[in-house]
Image (cartoon, rainbow, N blue to C red):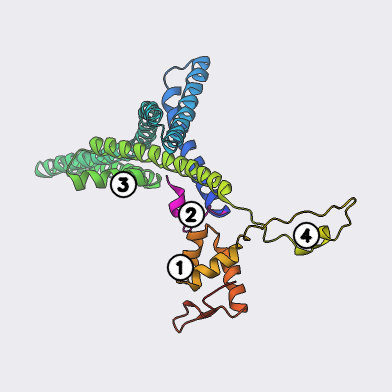
Amino acid sequence: MLYQDTIGRRYPKGSFAMVTVYALAGASILASTIFSLLLFLSIDDNLTMKWLFGSLAVIFEAGKFYAWYEFGERRAHSNYSGAFASLIFYLVLAVISIGGSIGGINSATNATHEQIAIEQAKINAFNRQIKAIDDQIALNNLAAEKYIEMEYIANGVTRIQADNKRLREEQMRLAAERDSLPPVAQGSIVGLIDSLAKMLGIKTDEAQLGLVVFLSILLDFFAAFFVGVIGEELRFRNFWRDSRTVTIDAIPEDITTYTAALPLKDEEPEIQEPSEPEKPSLHQEIARALASGELTCSKKAVSRRFRLHLNEVNMIFDEFQEKGLLGRKANQHFQWIGPEEIA
């Protein structure tokens, strides 16, 4: 990137921006690493193998993001062959990481589905028992009608009524136990999957797979984006630090006066050679450029031309205003009102 073209419009990010970038990058990298660990740790139940596969997942994640950072570094230095190699290395590790994230997110989603299915199965069991009691009561009522037709009311109907009373009490007890169960809570992810399946007209399993793949890819590239932001900002800060110029305008004049007044031993007359014309100071160069119309009376224009920070330009403009060289128009824009020739 040619930072020289934007030196007057861009400055290093502040502390708040950098803390936010580092926090988002760290959180996304941590989440990606955790999901990869969920996949690699499930490969083998042996504790030693879990340690080995877990270490492998962490190495892959760290290497992946460093490869992306190295890609930005080599591209910035116009090492395109090296940048291409880093990009290939990153893509290979990214595929492994995305696969791990898919496995981890899918596993968590399946666990939520299983918990909902278990709770729903308990309710369905109570519903089946209540339905069976309803069927038994219906059969008893049918038998009671037969007894009435056969005029065996005293023997059969009384017994059936007592049996129905017992069944209804059992039915009320089962209904109370069913209603005392905690409600089946459908998580947000499950509701989102069901909504996607209905909207797209596909199966729930297909909607879940598509959502998991999308979230895994988004997480990986989200982390890569912020790692790239950090690398680019570090490169710009190095350029900014190297491009700062140090002037001698701030050196007190009394230092040169004092050194000139010191007595010299064995002072011999020297032949004075014609001195070169003194180089104008930064303030004089800016004043001449504004007076001649070479630059517009704009702080951004001065900042871009002389590669100065806006705070320095503000101080120079304030000094010109105090000397009566700059004024403001009705629209609050600056205008040069001083002499056209600056000594």
Depth check, mark 4 against mark 2: the one in front is 4
Instruction: Kindly indicate the quadrant of the structure image that contains residue 100.
Output: top left
Residue linked to disc 3: 191
Residue at point 34%, 37% (across, down): 217
SS of the residue at dot 1?
loop
Magenta segment, prevailing SS (helix, strand or loop): loop
- Give the mark nearest the N terminus, 4 or 2: 2
Q: Amino acid at mark 1?
A: Leu
Q: Which residues are magenta?
A: 1-14
Residue linked to disc 2: 7
Q: Amino acid at mark 3?
A: Gly
Reply yes or no: does residue 2 show up in magenta. Answer: yes
SS of the residue at dot 2?
loop
Residue at point 55%, 59% (across, down): 308
- Give the mark nearest the N terminus, 3 or 4: 3
Contact (CB < 8 A) between labels 1 and 2?
no
Residue linked to disc 4: 256
Residue linked to disc 1: 295
